[in-house]
Image (tube, grey):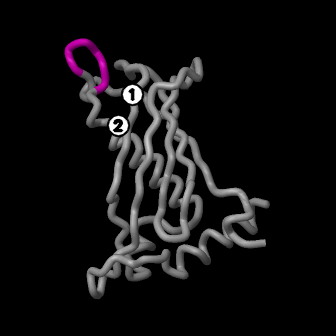
Amino acid sequence: MTPDDRPLPQVEVELDIPFHDVDMMQVAWHGHYVRYLEIARCKLFDAIDYNYLQMSDSGFAWPVIDLRLRYAAPALFAQRIRIEARLAEWENRLKVNYTVRDAATGQRLTRASTVQVAVGLEDQEMRLASPPVLIERLLAWQEANT
């Protein structure tokens, strides 16, 4: 069985919208969603035992090269939200899909995705395929979770 035949990791994070993230109408500013996604993405990378420090230690940076957000409903001050992060692609890039929901009702507030590519720290060159270290970590996660 290859990595693409097995389930891919996904995580959920819950957060309360803090006062400092909202405008005078108590609506979370759209730019703060990027931070919410990052919190969920960090938890996703922790789940596969390949977080940003481990990425750097393995010789790679993984910059975000594409970010897409689609807002369906606003997040409000003190609202508890749930961010679901799901790994969607891994062979040539990391694509993570997100759904932001109201934690109490499940109402979808936002859909998003990010794309990251491996860049060698020694030469600053973008890799056209994911490095073996990511594939090894993903295979280990899949073995433990199937």
Between residue 46 and residue 126, name the one nearer to us: 126
Between residue 113 and residue 46, name the one nearer to us: 113
Between residue 108 and residue 51, name the one nearer to us: 108
Q: Position of residue 101 (x, y in %)?
A: 52, 28
Above or below 118: residue 84: above
* Membership of 26 in magenta stretch: yes
Please, what is the three-letter code of the amino acid marked with disc 2? Tyr
Q: Residue at x 29, y 87 (%)?
A: 122
Q: Quadrant of the C terminus?
A: bottom right
Q: Position of residue 91 (x, y in %)?
A: 55, 70
Q: Residue at x 74, y 64 (%)?
A: 5
| Mark toward the viewer: 2 or 1 | 1
Q: Residue at x 37, y 43 (%)?
A: 68
User: Is residue 60 shown left or right of residue 6?
Assistant: left
How far separated are the C-alphas under marks 2 and 1?
Answer: 10 Å
Q: Residue at x 60, y 72 (%)?
A: 137
Between residue 78 and residue 82, name the one nearer to us: 82
Which of the labelled discs sits on residue 107, or is there none? none
Name the residue at the bottom extreme.
122
Above or below 69: residue 49: below
Residue 134 appears in which quarter of the rendering? Answer: bottom right
Q: Position of residue 62 (x, y in %)?
A: 37, 67
N-term-proximal mark, 2 vs 1: 2
Tell me whether circle 2 and circle 1 mark residues in contact (CB < 8 Å).
yes
Q: Position of residue 120 (x, y in %)?
A: 34, 81
Start-end of magenta stretch: 23-28
Residue marked by disc 1? 71
Residue marked by disc 2? 33
Asked which secondary structure carries label 1, the reply is strand
Above or below 89: residue 30: above
Asked which secondary structure carries label 2, the reply is helix
Other-residue count near label 1 (Cα within 10 Å), few / some / many at <14 / 14–19 / ≥20: some
